[in-house]
Image (cartoon, rainbow, N blue to C red):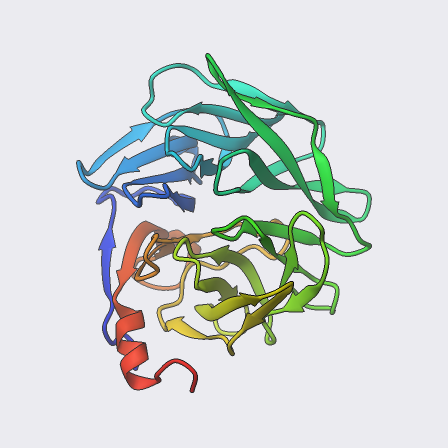
Amino acid sequence: MAGAGWQGTAIDGQARLFQNAHLSPDGQRLAVDGADEANLGIWIYDLQRETLTRLTSKPDYRPVLTPDGKYVVYSDAQGMSWTRADGDGKPHPLTQSTDSQLPTSFSPDGKRLAFHQDGPQGLDIWTVSIERDGEGLKAGTPELFLQTPFVERDASFSSDGRWLAYASNESGNPQVYVRAFPSKGGRWQISSTGGTAPIFCRNGRELFFYDLANGQIMMASYSAKGGSFVTEKPRVWSEVSVAALSASTGATQYDVAPDGKRLVAATYTGGATQQNAGHVIFLENFIDELQREVPLGK
């Protein structure tokens, strides 16, 4: 079924290197960061108007949009900062740290931000409360969520805020796990052949992740039964390979539209080489074809 039922659309025809794509919750805006010298900084692409706006010009990266789409939080040299997504105004510091802090996911109500940070033995998962004031965003005191002798990264909040998916190399290879939030009670392994960059779909039914074994995006349907997290066996969402994800930083090169039927990804254009990478495209409709071929539950 390679290539069946999907369509790809590049967001920008110019030769740019973009990475760390993140969609707004309404699916109308896309935040990315520039990966080459000429395009450093945070950018916003408006899907309806097809306009690309540069928000910062420093080596900032890993943008995450707030649930209302009004603000972008991103990693910088001093910790994390925020700016308005419409380009009106200047960047403001959110947290300050000498250790690298990479934002990954907002809780559905926008009141808590998950991020991973360099720790004594690798990356650890933290969260921080976020408040709104008259000028924008204000962070509380960061709280450690998960620290082990291993590397934990890429935390993603579920659509109801009850679960956090993340990647850890505790088994020797990166795999995707889910824990309850904020209690941390229970732990469920989702991937089996190597996984990273988990993303909960906002439809509340599906968990996506990147399969390290084949370079493809996988999807697992899930449900919550009491205090347990129950998933079906993960299956391929698209056989199109996206740009390689960094096992050390957990760079997330894709995001999922609210309905789970479209995916935006940094992918290669004209061959799997770094020189040919740089377009962000939309992949869509593959899940419909997949469900016709392999009904849910099989």
Q: Nearer the viewer, residue 12 or 216?
A: 216
Furthest-front residue in view?
226
State the image coordinates of residue 270 (x, y, percent, origin top left): 29, 61
At a point 51% along the width and 53% down the height, the residue shown is: 158
Q: Quadrant of the N terminus?
A: bottom left
Q: Is residue 72 visible?
A: yes
Q: Nearer the viewer, residue 194 or 226?
A: 226
- Does residue 78 lie above or below 194 as drawn? above
State the image coordinates of residue 249 (x, y, percent, origin top left): 61, 49
Q: Nearer the viewer, residue 295 or 36?
A: 295
Q: Is residue 4 left or right of residue 117?
A: left
At a point 46% along the width and 70% down the height, the residue shown is: 221
Q: Is residue 176 visible?
A: no
- Does residue 156 lie above or below 102 as drawn? below
State the image coordinates of residue 280 (x, y, percent, origin top left): 32, 50
Q: Quadrant of the C terminus?
A: bottom left
Labels in figure, total: 0
